[in-house]
Every structure is written in C-alpha cells, then in structure tokens.
Image: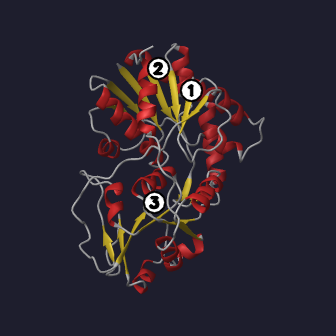
Amino acid sequence: MNIAVYISGHGFGHLAQMAPVLNRIHALKPECRFLIRSALPYDEIDSRLDFDFELESTDTDVGVVQKSAIEEDREASIVRMRRWVDALERQIARETSLLRSFAPSVVVSNISPLAFPAAQSLEIPNIGLATLDWHTIYAHWLAPDDPVIEKLAQAYAACDLLLTPPMAMDMGVFPVRRQIGLIAAQPAAIPDPAGDTERKRALVLFGGCAHPPFDMAALAAMDEWLFLMPGCPAGAPDNVQAVHFGNGLRAVDVMPLVDVVVCKPGYGVLSECWSCSRPIAWVERPDFPEFPMLKRWLDECMPAAGMSRSDFRHGNWLAALQAASSHGRKFPLIDSDGAHQAADIILSCGAG
C-alpha cells in the first residue's frame, strides 16, 4: 500500500501528531511505502519515524509568520497567505500530478489544504488529522467573504474525514469529523543527561522556533533550579545546561527526568507533557487564535501555571515554576490511544 502524507512545516506540532500514527501504520503494515510532503527538515522527520520514507520537500501550506515563538505577525501572515491562495489552483494541479505518479491508496494531511482537492480529483480517499486548520485560524482575522477564507473553505470541504485528537479547535469547515484519543510520542529510557540530582529541573522548549528573547542572566538567581535548554548559548549561567536533540534523543525522552517543562502552548509539547505527566510553566501567546482554547485546557485540566510575555522576557519565571511544580491537579486519564485509532482508520480507508 502506498500512502501519501502531507505535514505542515509550521512548527513541529503537526509532525508530533503524525509521527506516532505513521509509526503505528508501519508496525501493522511494514510493506507500506510512504511519500511525505513537507518543508520540515529531513533530519527532524527522520528522528521521529521508525522507517524509511521518501520526502518531497517543498511548502505545502503557509501557516503563520512568526516574529518569535510566542509572537505572530498578523499583517505579514495575511499578505503571505493572500499570495499563496492566489496560486492555489496551480499548486493543486502540481499535487495532482505528483499523486498520480505515486499512486497512493490513501492521502493523509495535517493540515495542507492542497491534499484534499488533489486526492478528490483522482478519486483517492483522503483523511485529515489535525487540531487546527488554516481556515479556522485566518477566519479569526479576515471577513467571512474574504477570498482567502472562501478558497480555503472550498479546499478543506474536499476532505473525506477529519480526525481530531483532544485540544482541537472547532473546525466546522470540515464536513465530516470524528474525535479520537490523545496522540503523543512515548518516552524512551535514557541515561540522565544532567547528572545534577540536587536541584529541581526545568526543560525549556519552544518547538520548531528559536527561543524568544529573554534575560538569560536572570536565571542565575534561581539557583535551586537547573535549566535544560536546546540551543543554549555560550556564557550561560552555571545552572543552565545545554541539551542536544537528534541522533535518537527527543524532547519527550528527557521529560520524565525533569520537574517542569517551560514552553509556549502548542499541541506537540502539551500532548507529550500529558503522556509523561509533567507539569507545565507556559508563556502566553495571545496573538494566535488557537491560544484561548489551549489556555482553557491548561487552566482547567492540567497541572500548569502561566506567565506573561513580559515576565518571560525579563526572566521572572520563578512564580510559574513553583506554582506548576506544586500543583495538585493531575492530567486527565488517557483512556484511548489516538495513534492506534487513526492508524486503523487510515489503513481501512486505504484498503477500500
């Protein structure tokens, strides 16, 4: 069976959702051949998948322009999306040609709008898997009759079935939707990368974006905490330690070894904290339309504490770290495996 998979290059959350599903499909059907369409780096995709795949590496959607990991550029995003949508028909034609050559039994998208009309034109079953889509995001910023909104709605309406894990936005543009369980990578047992057992530990993560600017020197005042940080610059305080992901080490592997995860709210990191039962000290992201929904989950369902962008920028993290690490709330019980559910649905759809 050939399976074509579209994965948005906007951050790593879309890949975090897709990878456990694809690994499950491969475990069930190792003879499957996968074509992945994504602008994400090959090494990042490869680090999360347990099998060989073909990568067609060009943009499959626009996403949102980021000023930093916690600040979106609405105006630049709209300009870029208008330009992309103006070429939508030509891009769909390209995808149609690519799919015709690959001859997949099923097409899966998270959450490129190109995949659905291209698959539909070839009468190939298609499935969406996502917690957000670009129509729902941009509908918060543009009028309902804006050409961008209308064209995105038309493309997403060609989706046969949308699968939605917990923490999904209300994506009414999709005609058929089905809820599934949480999808999250599971940690592997690893040697302790820190060695320091005297201090509490915080893993600082901002997904596919660089760390937003903050006062690194201010972390030195929190001497009772050890901060594990990818991309740690030279000259960091003694209680800041670099951690390097890749070559078999993922963020989720380190999570069981820390007391708190410092992050922006996004599906990938929140789902992995959930699977590892790790408290969350989160930084507000008020410009992104997904944030209010995720904030409700953080406030009502998770052991978590927030901080403003100003507090984050000035290194005033201690209150959020203490509140998160001492929070009495537990994560909701994970009563079903969304990756297994999605894999079974995709394989059933591809089998006709």
Determine which quarter of the picture holds residue 205.
bottom left
Which class describes the residues within 10 Å of circle 1: few (<14), some (14-19), or many (20+)? many
Residue 208 visible in this rendered orientation of the protein: no
Compared with 347, 45 (above or below) is: below
Where disc 2 sits, the SS reads helix
In the image, what residue type sits under mark 2? Cys
Mark 3: secondary structure: loop
> CB of mark 1 within 8 Å of CB of mark 2?
yes
181 up-or-down from 213: above or below: above
In this rendering, would 116 be left or right of 342? right
Which is nearer the eye, 181 or 2? 181
Number of residues whose C-alpha sits closer than 10 Å to that of mark 2, classed few (under 14), some (14–19) or many (20 or more): some
Counting from the top left corner in percent of width and height, residue 234 is at 31, 74
Q: In the picture provided, is 7 more to the left or to the right than 23?
A: right
Residue at the spot of label 2? 349
237 with respect to 7 (left or right):
left
Specify the amino acid type for callout 1: Leu
CA gap between label 3 and label 1 equals 30 Å
Q: Which of marks 3 and 1 is nearer the N terminus?
A: 1
**Which of the colour schemes (rainbow, by chain, secondary structure, one colour) is used?**
secondary structure
Q: Residue at x 44, y 55 (%)?
A: 207
Residue 161's tag is: 1
Callout 3 amino acid: Phe
Residue appearing at x 70%, y 42% in the figure: 139
Decide if residue 20 is on the left or right side of residue 88. Answer: left
Q: Provide the residue designation for mark 3.
A: 206
Circle nearer the N terminus (2, 3): 3
